Amino acid sequence: MLFLLKVLVTPLLVAAVSVAARWWGPTIGGILMGLPWMTGPVLFVLVQDRGIDFGVAASVGIELGVLCISAFILAYGFISTVSSWPLSLAGAVAAFAASAWLLQKLTHWPVHTAGLLLAAGLGLLSLAIVYLLLPRPRTPLSLQALPWWDIPMRMVATGVLVTILMLLADAMGPQLSGIVSTYPVILTVIGCFTHHRWGREAVWRVLRGLAASLVAFVAFFLVVGLMLPAAGLVGSYVLASLAALATTSGLLISSRMRAPGQD
């Protein structure tokens, strides 16, 4: 079920975010990309099957995973200042894998409230550092029209990448499968296509928007992890969704109020 959910839904999410980026700019696309579109529903299904304690522990792991995504974003941003998308992607994948491998060694990380708060705090700190260090666009935003085949190709690429990652995860041990399962598929596809089609400054806008938006991602799983024991699965998800939507709404309003080229 989870395999079908990821393979069928993730390409649709890529298409939706790509259209949003075309209409409202890559910064908005990055902001929308940071919502827990896939991780949230997947965890919901897993908690139904494995219980509340699993959901709390998974929330801690997801918060730690934000550190790996931060490493991916920062590496891609830095390398893209001097190279095209293939080398930028290779460096970002290496940074993600290295940070994820290191985190997998934290086998005794606490999964209670203190551990969840610490993991969320580290995730927020990493996002703040990434946002401050990422290259800033220097020229006004200028987007060219996309060919008709661009979004279908993004969807195909997403489906192929998700399938490969899921098959690899099934063939690996628990530590390496954990690394594979948290890989940022949507960011990979949209980031590379944006970089190739519109240039490095466009992908910088995507990366900066995503780094800001992942604050909502952190808030979502922090609320889920804290509220699961008291409010249950449905109640915790309602509260977490409200927190994430409020954060994202603030980011969208802030982005629309900025002058073009300042994001």
Image (cartoon, rainbow, N blue to C red):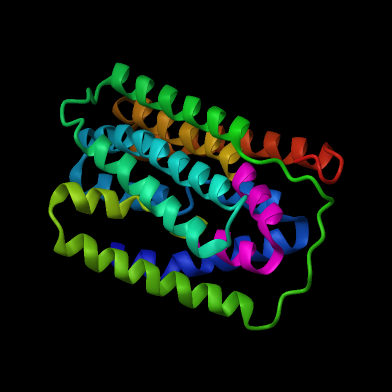
Q: Residue 49 placed where, x, y %?
A: 21, 50
Q: Is residue 185 left or right of residue 260?
A: left
Of residues 194 and 3, the one nearer the viewer is 194
Report the residue that reaches farthest toward the top.
Answer: 114
Query: How many tags in the picture?
Result: 0
Q: Considering only vertical position in the picture, is 66 above or below 207?
A: above
Q: Considering only vertical position in the picture, is 20 above or below 150?
A: above
Of residues 134 and 106, the one nearer the viewer is 134
Question: Which residue is at 62% across, 30% downward?
Answer: 132
Of residues 209 and 252, the one nearer the viewer is 209
Q: Residue 144 placed where, x, y %?
A: 79, 70
Q: Is residue 169 left or right of residue 87?
A: left
Q: Considering only vertical position in the picture, is 164 above or below 67?
A: below
Q: Which residues are magenta?
A: 188-209
Q: Residue 90 placed where, x, y %?
A: 43, 58
Image quadrant where one finds the C terminus:
top right
Q: Main secondary structure of the magenta part?
A: helix
Image quadrant where one finds the N terminus:
bottom left
Q: Is residue 174 left or right of residue 151?
A: left
Q: Considering only vertical position in the picture, is 141 above or below 104?
A: below
Report the residue that reaches farthest toward the right.
Answer: 259
Residue 101 in the magenta stretch? The answer is no
Question: Which residue is at 26% across, 44% downward?
Answer: 47
Residue 196 in the magenta stretch? The answer is yes
Task: Work out whether residue 127 can be spotted.
Answer: yes
Dividing the picture into quadrants, the one containing residue 6 is bottom left
Report the residue that reaches farthest toward the left.
Answer: 173
Question: Which residue is at 35% across, 34% downward?
Answer: 64
Dividing the picture into quadrants, the one containing residue 134 is top right
